Amino acid sequence: MGGGGRAAAASAPNPWSGALALQSDDGPPAESAAEAAIRYREKELERREQTLANRENALKDREEKVDRVLERQMNWPPFRPILYHSIEKEIPPRGQGMVRRMYSLWMFAVWTYVFNCVACFTLLVTKNAAGGGMFGMSLLIAAVAVPVSWSFWYRQLYNGTRDDKSIRFFLFFINFAFHLGASGALLVGIPGWGGAGVIVTLEQFSVNLISAIFCVIASASLGIQLVLGIWGLKDVTMYYRSMGMSLDRAKQEAAVGVAQSSVGQSLLKEGAKQAIAAKTGQAV
């Protein structure tokens, strides 16, 4: 009886055997300590590689910043650098041709002012009645016009093209129009105005031929400068319109610039205080 019961129990099916078989067949195998250590090392190596990559990127960024600072060292004018000027590196490719042409025009304007002084000096040497005043005015014009033309029209164009600012172009148009007007007045050559232009040149032919030839060259330079300036103005206007710039955009940029300045912020704070004080007074 006992033997038969044990045999029947041994031969009876185990209800958990299928589940255990499925668990052993389908479940993931137990990870050994060695495999866990290898996986930990792999993750640690990946973390260290990522850290090194981040450090390399940070070093590259620092090197690029240092290179940009070194590249932006003062390089103009070449004989005594006082500022940084690089059309190739700062001006977008679309505007480089225009800026180069206007830079050449500015250089030609410098030549014109200098040679106008030379021509007026010949008036002084040949004892022209207005020679002294003409030479003095020509020196004053050259001393003022060269830095003013650089700062007030060429540099405005350069910065406007570099930064895509309508307000810079607006300032360029105003100052360049004044420059063209002054060149036209010098080209006329009114005695005493400092320009060895047409009138002075015609008068000088009856006084001294060599001096008259100098005045002819000065007049021709003034005329060429005026014609090239009108052509350059057309070139800049076409670029200005092609970039979608406008007077309204210039006004917005000017308003933003004033608001961001220290004076504008102090005015805004003062206005806010007055508004709060007014509201407080009305509430009381």
Image (tube, rainbow, N blue to C red):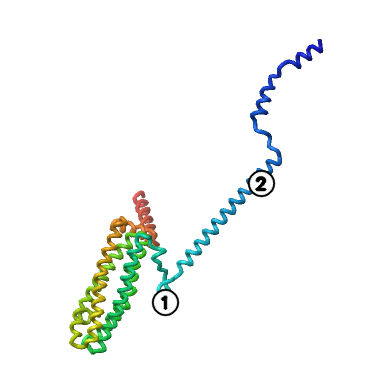
On screen, residue 1 above or below 72: above
Say which residue appears at 22% left-offset and 85% top-offset. 130
Q: Quadrant location of residue 122?
A: bottom left
Q: Is residue 43 left or right of residue 214?
A: right
Q: Quadrant location of residue 222?
A: bottom left
x and y percentages locating residue 58 in the rendered image? 54, 57
On screen, residue 240 above or below 6: below
x and y percentages locating residue 53 in the rendered image? 57, 53
Say which residue appears at 25% left-offset and 84% top-offset. 133
Ranked by sequence position, the earlier of labels 1 and 2 is 2
On screen, residue 8 above or below 143: above
Q: Residues within 10 Å of mark 2 (few under 14, many from 20)?
A: few
Q: Looking at this view, is 82 or 242 the one in front?
A: 242
Which SS class for mark 1? loop
x and y percentages locating residue 38 in the rendered image? 67, 44
Q: Residues within 10 Å of mark 1 (few under 14, many from 20)?
A: few
The reply to whether dot 1 and dot 2 touch (C-beta < 8 Å) is: no
On screen, residue 141 above or below 238: below
Residue type highlighted by circle 1: Phe
Check residue 79 in the rendering and tell me which mark sits there, or answer none: 1
x and y percentages locating residue 34 in the rendered image? 71, 41
Check residue 41 in the rendering and tell me which mark sits there, or answer none: 2
Q: Is residue 278 left or right of residue 181?
A: right
Q: Quadrant of the N terminus?
A: top right
Q: Quadrant location of residue 155?
A: bottom left
